[in-house]
Image (tube, rainbow, N blue to C red):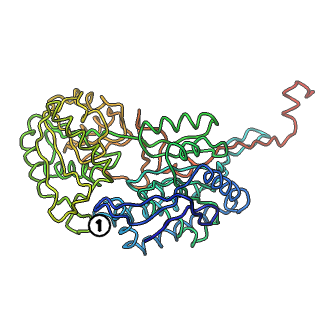
Amino acid sequence: MPHYQLLIGGDFVDTAEHYDVVSPADSEVIATLAKGTVEHVDLAVAAAEKAFKESGWRETPAHVRAEVVAKAADLIMARAAEVSGLASRENGTPIRLAAGLSVGFPVMHMQYFAGLARAFVADRPAYVNGSVSSVIRREPIGVVAGIIPWNFALLLAVWKAVPAILAGNSIVLKVDEKTPSTAFVLAEVLTECGLPPGVLNIITGDGETVGGYLTAHPRVRKISFTGSTATGRTVMRNAAANVKQVTLELGGKGANIVLADADLELAVDGTLWGFLMHAGQACESGTRLFVHDSIYAQFIERLVNRAAELTVGDPANAATDVGPVMNAAQKARIESFIDSAVAEGAKLEYQGKVSETAHEKGHFVPPTIFTNVTPEMRVTVNEVFGPVLAVMRFNDVDAVVDEANNSEFGLSAGVWTRDLATANDIAGRLESGTVWINDWHALPGPLPFGGYKQSGFGREMGPNAILAYTNEKVISVDHSGRSARAAWGLVLP
């Protein structure tokens, strides 16, 4: 059975206490993991700081750093079967989807980030006025911290660590104890390709104590956090004590709008993908569905019939479409939303069945669709983080835009229609960091990702992904030697 240790300063460090890594598909212990403490945070930050100052990584040309990442991406791709298997076993992603979600997607983003680094220019001429010339210089921030959840472990490790190190920083990455393995694969291949020890450090530990200590650490100069809105507020408070930079990618409650002229087959499939990908355990899931009155009945009929074709079960089975949720606590939380929706008067329009071949100790929640839902219901307001869809109907576009915006979240939204002019008008009015038109979950590297409102701030990916891990410095030169004296009125005619 694998045992994962902390990675600090290039060395593996074990701890007195360990976590069990448990498969959500059958509740079997599949690995053990070192459990970090605040003392390990201090060690990791010190190692990162030493690497930043002494390893030469920040002085390494950006195009050379890019080649380290590009080669590492190739090594991960060469191990695609192994890495997708690790991810599927740890987080329940159906193996048929894991090759794309857990390997292909992260590798594509690594390649994109490497391309940005190849074109990175640290010094940009900015101002020339007579005898004065200036440049704007982009410099690495120093020691940064990344904190990632369990749902897309490798992808989110890539989003945090790769732009940070490409900018010349060192990073302490806190991984979730439920899905640690793929982050260690990332560290392994980066090291093999030339990343110096201490530039990437991996720790674990209790979120409140270890995570809190890391985010408040005075020598950490930037935090990038993905997780719940409640924890994001805590991260902000901790960061405020040292006035450090923060990027927050938090919760969501995606509004999915189907107009009267939508391609119904496309919209049905897109809706199912929008709320069932990874069993709904994605912050950008489309879990609030608004369907126009004129197509409502036929749309719901098609949606239910199509959902019934999906297989819920063992993620190792190539025929499985929807795997388990993460653990017993997550299952109980999702089921509490289902129970409250029924109690509040929603109609349980459809609930799927779990395959008979699925393990009895697996944490399975079948696709669940509610109609007759109202805006104030708990299932409509809160992020469920599971395969549960709340359906509402509308007949006025202005009203549905207002209702879509009637949420504390603003991470994702979607519009289904053949009229792109109307779609773009609606997209412009939706309070959301990403709006998909006739699509869902499309997150290519060139497009920045992040939220409005309580879904966070700052962006990951996109053309500024590396710049987000730099400070701007202005260097201004007076070539005449006269300006400073002139400021005091000392220059004579």
Instruction: Give the number of marks.
Output: 1
Q: Secondary structure at mark 1?
A: helix
Q: Is residue 289 above or below residue 114?
A: above
Toward the viewer: 203 or 457? 203
For this view, does 103 lie left or right of residue 193? left
Query: Which image quadrant is residue 481 in?
Result: top right
Query: What residue is rendered at 20% in x and 50% in y?
Result: 272
Relative image position of residue 300 (x, y in whole percent): 10, 43
Query: What residue is rendered at 48% in x and 67% in y?
Result: 3
Q: Is residue 138 above or below residue 345?
A: below
For this view, does 69 lie left or right of residue 453? right
Quadrant (top left, top right, bottom left, bottom right) of the N terminus = bottom left
Q: Is residue 252 above or below residue 111?
A: above
Query: What residue is rendered at 25% in x and 32% in y?
Result: 378
For this view, does 156 lie left or right of residue 425? right
Residue 441 in view here? yes
Q: Of the residues shown, which amino acid type is indicated by label 1?
A: Ile
Q: Residue furthest top?
A: 489
> Circle 1 is placed at which residue position?
95
Quadrant (top left, top right, bottom left, bottom right) of the C terminus = top right
Query: Which image quadrant is residue 242 in?
Result: top right
Relative image position of residue 186 (x, y in whole percent): 50, 65
Relative image position of residue 411 (x, y in whole percent): 37, 40
Residue 104 in view here? no
Q: Residue furthest front?
A: 16
Query: Which image quadrant is residue 90 in?
Result: bottom left
Relative image position of residue 311 (x, y in whole percent): 17, 60
